[in-house]
Amino acid sequence: MNFKFKALIAAASLITAGVGATQASAFTPWQYNHPGRVEVNHRLAMQNFRIQEARRDGRITAFQAYRLHQEDRNIRMQERWFASRNGSHLTRGEHRFLNREENGVSHRI
């Protein structure tokens, strides 16, 4: 019984390691098929980090951080709404619009 249990644990760990390695080395199908959405969401995540850093450093107040986070949430909702209308894709114009919105928030951080 002890040997079977150890073998099961070893097999499970090898499978987990293999899945982790393949996911880290390549784009997922979603990322490959929706590069515009991936870019927009990555920028939003980076802006979120920058807002938190600016708040920690004292460059912006808590209220300013709240407002910036609120604007980022609105951009994320717009991105999802645009994608829902186009089969999970963003058109070139929608992508440009969202980038302009993100640029505006970025300048205020």
Image: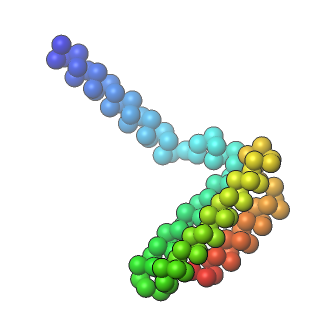
Name the residue at 27% across, 26% down.
Answer: 9
User: Could you tell me residue 27's position as x and y percent?
Assistant: 58, 45
Query: For the view shown, which residue lies furthest in the left direction?
Result: 2
The answer to whether 93 appears left or right of 109 in the picture is right
The answer to whether 76 appears left or right of 14 in the picture is right
Q: Is residue 23 above or below residue 96?
A: above
Name the residue at 54% across, 81% down.
Answer: 64
| Colour scheme of the rendered structure | rainbow
Query: For the view shown, which residue lies furthest in the top direction?
Result: 1
Name the residue at 68% across, 75% down.
Answer: 103
User: Could you tell me residue 59's position as x and y percent?
Assistant: 47, 86
Q: Is residue 104 above or below residue 94?
A: below
Of the pair 17 and 78, the residue shown nearer to us: 78
**Is residue 43 in sight in this rendering?**
no
The answer to whether 10 appears left or right of 107 in the picture is left
User: Could you tell me residue 106's position as x and y percent?
Assistant: 62, 77
Q: How many marks?
A: 0
Name the residue at 77% across, 66% down.
Answer: 96
Q: Quadrant of the C terminus?
A: bottom right
